Image: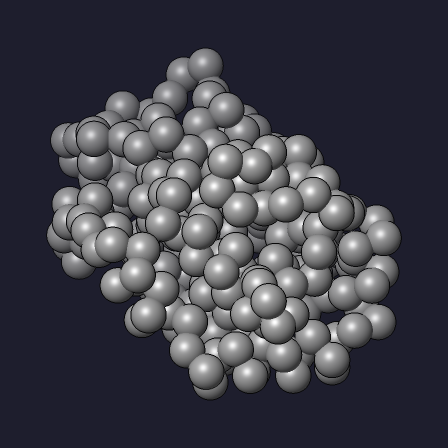
């Protein structure tokens, strides 16, 4: 959900972070030791930090991707949408609207976000949970980005949030796998958003955005609702709901694609 807006997104959530942040750059092991102390001061147990940081090394592929991610949206809307919203994905989304109709009704009633928007986001982010959710260890990815001095404040906050996901028992470390900026799950939440907006909608005591469809869709709705999305209002470019989706993705092309896909799902 965050690829085009990493420079500014969610700094206020957890990346505003600690009073004494670990120093970026320099020896990586020293940096990790600083982050360990910081996490434990924030309430993360020694057992979690030891398991998370044991044997950790930097990932050069993450830094390489970070340097080139600014070019994600160098296509026109027509070019971009043609690669993301085809007949197969539309038909798949329509089938899921039917399969999860009762769940989506409950989410609409509680959060006021229309089902077609949620299913469109779900489809774009991970092909409805069947596609690529990332294959990288989130702690290693975020430690690499936090150590890099380009946006260390942002990613130190995300690293602390990822550790808190494990501390809370939402996901074990073995399932804390994500994409190149630490995005997690079927709608690709950054860890700070996972902590801030995640909802245990299936009632099992955990916010599981990798495996629980109920948690995934309700958490996505909660994020949009919390940022002003209103049921029954338009969501095309220039509308208040279109602006509310900036918290999901600042790129105009991406938000237009969400709306276009949502309309196709309901036959508009």
Q: Residue furthest top?
A: 19
Quadrant of the rendering where the C terminus is positioned: bottom right
- The percent coordinates of residue 72 (x first, y second) are 24, 52
Nearest the eye: 89 or 12? 89
Q: Is residue 236 above or below residue 156?
A: below
Residue 80: x and y in percent read 30, 62
* Residue name at image x 37 percent, y 43 percent: 251
Left or right: residue 8 versus residue 258 is left
Instruction: Name which residue lies at 57% across and 63% down.
Output: 262
Q: Quadrant of residue 35?
A: top left
**Total numbered labels:** 0
Q: Is 89 located above or below residue 18 in the figure? A: below
Where is residue 228 shown, x and y percent of the image? 66, 33
> Which residue appears farthest toward the front when viewing the image?
268
Residue 214 position in % (x across, y down): 73, 65
In this rendering, would 7 be left or right of 164?
Answer: left
Which residue is painted at 56% across and 83% down in the image? Answer: 92
Q: Is residue 243 visible?
A: yes
Question: What residue is drawn where x is 25% and y is 54%?
Answer: 76
* Depth order, front residue of 92/25: 92
């Amino acid at each position: 959900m965050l690829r085009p807006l990493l420079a500014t997104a969610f700094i206020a959530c957890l990346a505003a972070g600690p009073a004494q942040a670990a120093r970026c750059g320099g020896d990586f092991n020293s940096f990790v030791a600083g982050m360990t102390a910081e996490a434990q001061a924030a309430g993360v147990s020694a057992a979690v930090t030891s398991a998370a940081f044991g044997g950790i090394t930097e990932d050069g592929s993450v830094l390489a991707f970070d340097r080139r991610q600014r070019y994600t949206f160098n296509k026109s809307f027509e070019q971009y949408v043609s690669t993301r919203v085809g007949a197969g994905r539309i038909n798949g989304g329509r089938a899921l609207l039917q399969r999860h109709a009762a769940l989506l009704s409950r989410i609409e009633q509680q959060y006021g976000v229309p089902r077609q928007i949620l299913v469109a986001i779900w489809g774009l982010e991970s092909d409805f949970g069947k596609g690529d959710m990332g294959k990288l260890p989130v702690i290693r990815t975020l430690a690499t980005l936090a150590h890099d001095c380009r946006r260390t404040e942002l990613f130190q906050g995300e690293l602390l949030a990822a550790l808190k996901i494990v501390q809370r028992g939402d996901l074990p470390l073995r399932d804390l796998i994500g994409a190149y900026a630490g995005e997690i799950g079927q709608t690709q939440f950054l860890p700070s958003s996972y902590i801030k907006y995640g909802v245990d909608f299936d009632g099992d005591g955990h916010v599981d955005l990798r495996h629980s469809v109920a948690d995934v869709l309700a958490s996505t709705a909660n994020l949009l609702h919390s940022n002003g999305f209103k049921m029954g209002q338009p969501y095309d470019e220039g509308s208040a709901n279109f602006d509310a989706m900036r918290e999901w993705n600042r790129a105009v092309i991406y938000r237009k694609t969400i709306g276009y896909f949502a309309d196709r799902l309901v036959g508009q």
